[in-house]
Image (tube, rainbow, N blue to C red):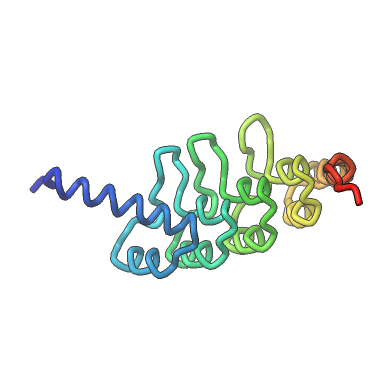
Amino acid sequence: MQATAAEEARYAELQRIALGAARHGDLTTLAPMLDAGLPVNLRDEKGNSLLMLAAYHGEQAAVELLLGHGADPDARNDRQQTPLAGVAFKGHLEVACILLAAGADATADQGGGRTPAMFAAMFGHTDLLTLLNEKSERPRSRMLGLKLTSWARLVSALRRWFVPRKLA
């Protein structure tokens, strides 16, 4: 039996609703959908999983819900980025802790040899960088992490220096 065009359109709409619910941390919508059998590793047109969207937007409760339903903590999008890399880019320390506790790879190559720690350093998230360095299993990554921590501090200082200030 094949789905009708109307059924396929409704399923596509339900997918859009689920992706939006993950992005906005709408557990009232997302939880029943997962309980009813919505694929926990559902992806959008860019390959972003529900978990990637929730993590990137700092939605801790949605991240926990999705991981509790078996979401892959290292599911990559079409750009080969993991949820932990998205979190490192945005600086969501608490979400990073949740992902790492669920087994996310702190040293996963995001393409071109870039790691989540490099994203954290690039955007001056020193607390997140420290966490990622602690979770790194590779000695070379830890050494690089020390250099990246210094780099992240410099980036943070430069941002504070160049942020326009209001004159009194």
Which of 127/115 is in front?
127
Which of 7/35 is in front?
7
Name above or below for residue 150 compared with residue 14. above
Residue drawn at x 84%, y 46% is 156
Horizontal side of residue 149 vs 136, given as left or right: right
Name above or below for residue 101 compared with residue 126. below
Horizontal side of residue 164 vs 32, given as left or right: right
Which of 113/166 is in front?
166
Residue drawn at x 54%, y 37% is 80
State the residue lying farthest toward the top.
112
Residue 97, given in percent of the width and then of the height, sits at 66, 62
Residue drawn at x 86%, y 39% is 162
Horizontal side of residue 80 vs 138, given as left or right: left
Residue drawn at x 40%, y 44% is 44
Q: Looking at the rendering, which quadrant does residue 20 occupy?
A: bottom left
Residue 87, given in percent of the width and then of the height, sits at 63, 51
Horizontal side of residue 39 vs 126, given as left or right: left
